[in-house]
Amino acid sequence: MSETSDQEFELFAAYKISIEYPSGWEIQIKALKRDQGVVSFKSKNEECVCTLTWGPLKGVQKKFSDPEEQAQSVIDGFREKSGIKDFALLEKRRLTINGHEAAMLRVKAKLKLGSLLSRTWLSSNIQALYLYCDETERYLIVYALSPPQEDDYLNIFSHMIQSLKCH
């Protein structure tokens, strides 16, 4: 267990994938198999949700040559969606996570929630990390939705992605 800005972290691990998440956050497992998984970590007030997903690398490599190309595709998709407005790319960069090349992006946008009768726009920061692991033949994605101007959540996301291990 480690600390970031007085925040304590716990370890989640399954099938040799591990990530540290803030103590006290709820874990929601949507899928948990060796080849495919979706695990969400929710803050106590559900203000921030970080999700870890993984799946077969072969499938994603049919569409994208590397994590950076996948991240760019996501950015392009945000720009084209009708349920998103005031989109701004805040950061996009390459980094190394546990010896693997990865791509990270951070955007802000207003997301449309609700139905045709009652529409609400939610301002949000969105962070995402894309990583390909040839050794385990899996891709990993970590993404987070949090309120704008919440630096604590940005620090938490940074800690989580730096703690990520795929084998």
Image (cartoon, rainbow, N blue to C red):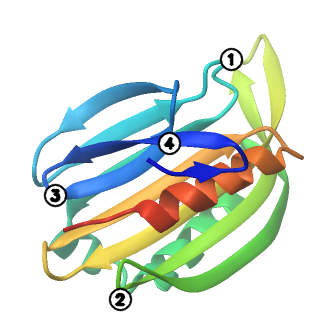
Looking at marks 3 and 1 on the same chain, the residue that comes earlier in the sequence is marked by 3
Residue on which disc 3 sits: 16
Query: Contact (CB < 8 A) between labels 4 and 2?
Result: no
Say which of marks 2 and 3 sits in front.
3
* Amino acid on which the number 1 mark rests in the picture: Ser
Say which of marks 2 and 1 sits in front.
2
Disc number for residue 115: 1
Say which of marks 4 and 2 sits in front.
4
Looking at marks 2 and 3 on the same chain, the residue that comes earlier in the sequence is marked by 3
- How far across and how far down the image is residue 138, in percent? 20, 68
Which of 80/139 is in front? 139
* Amino acid on which the number 4 mark rests in the picture: Phe
Residue 21 appears in the figure: yes
The CA distance from mark 3 to mark 1 is: 40 Å
Please give the name of the residue rendered at 64% of the width and 41% of the height, measured from the top-left corner: 7
Residue 57, quarter of picture: bottom left
The CA distance from mark 2 to mark 1 is: 37 Å
* Amino acid on which the number 2 mark rests in the picture: Ser
Disc number for residue 9: 4
- How far across and how far down the image is residue 20, in percent? 43, 49
From the viewer's perspective, is residue 146 above or below residue 131?
above
The CA distance from mark 4 to mark 2 is: 33 Å
Residue on which disc 2 sits: 65
Say which of marks 4 and 1 sits in front.
4
Please give the name of the residue rendered at 29% of the width and 30% of the height, measured from the top-left corner: 30
Q: Secondary structure at mark 4?
A: strand
Residue 81 appears in the figure: no
Residue at the farthest top position: 117
Give the class, few, some or many, for how many residues have Cα within 10 Å of label 3's Cα (few <14, many ≥20): few
Looking at marks 4 and 1 on the same chain, the residue that comes earlier in the sequence is marked by 4
Query: Contact (CB < 8 A) between labels 4 and 3?
Result: no
